[in-house]
Image (spheres, grey):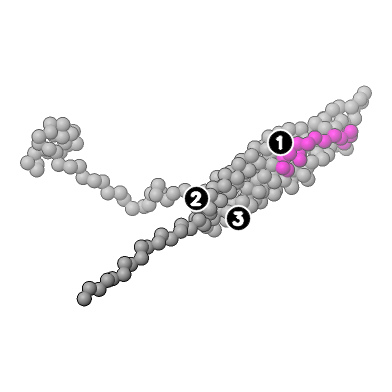
Amino acid sequence: MEYVTAASPAPVPLPRSESAPAASTGGRRSLAAALLLGALGAAVVLLASGRTWAEGAAAVPGGAFPLAVEGQDVTGAPAALAVVGLAALVAVFAVRRAGRLLVAGLLALSGAGAAVTALLGASGGTALDEKAAKMTGDAAATAGSLTHTAWPYATAVGGLLILVAGLLALWCGRRWPSMSGRYERDGSPRTRKAPAAPDPDRPEDLWKALDRGEDPTRDV
């Protein structure tokens, strides 16, 4: 009697999970966005801090002396915090886990601090009064006819861009790549591979052995 065995069903390939590619794509996008926003924000802060923030005039005998102050004269905090933010933006890729969270938090705080200090110094009145007292030689002199520019608010916008970059690093930084550890050297000594024995049939090998101070005939 012949028995007919049923053919086993062919294995059905399982569908690939799409979550990993999607997560990788999302990580790259957030990384590019954070880099762009952080670098652009720092550049805006550094540029706007060197521009004129406020103008005025000091009363002197025979008329008025025009005055103008730049952002660096009003407050140096936004520019300094922008430099700190740039350093933190680079350091995000050099650390991992908890260290990355700390650096991302520093990046966000740098942006927030730059924006707040720029808005607080937008009027430039104190810096103008100090300049008026210096120019007139009268400690009680003040500046009048104050006018303000848009550069302090541009500085604040740059700080907000750095803040957004820090928030992206806090939210998405765990999916970002970090510096590879394969290039980091440990403290263990490296073993050198012993040179191969020279081939007596290859004159160039014999000459190389002689250059190294070896006896090419020791293994012959």
Give the percent coordinates (x, y) of residue 216.
11, 38
Q: Which badge, 2 or 3, is on the more N-terminal residue?
A: 3
Residue 133 vs residue 72: left or right? right
| Distance from Cα at disc 2 to Cα at disc 3 | 14 Å
- The boundaries of the magenta stretch are 141-157
When asked about the image quadrant of residue 140, the answer is: top right
Q: Residue at x 71, y 34 (%)?
A: 50
Q: Which residue is mark 1?
A: 48
- The percent position of residue 79, horizontal first and vertical second, equals 67, 40
Task: Say whether residue 114 is magenta.
Answer: no
Query: Is residue 80 rendered to the left or right of residue 95?
Result: right
Quarter the N terminus occupies: bottom left
Q: What percent of the width, then of the height, locates residue 21?
A: 50, 52
Q: Which residue is mark 3?
A: 171
Location of residue 6 in the rendering, given as x and y in whole percent from the top left corner:
31, 70
**Drawn side of residue 140 relative to residue 195, left or right:** right
Q: Which mark is residue 177?
A: 2
Residue shown at 89% from the left, 33% from the top: 145
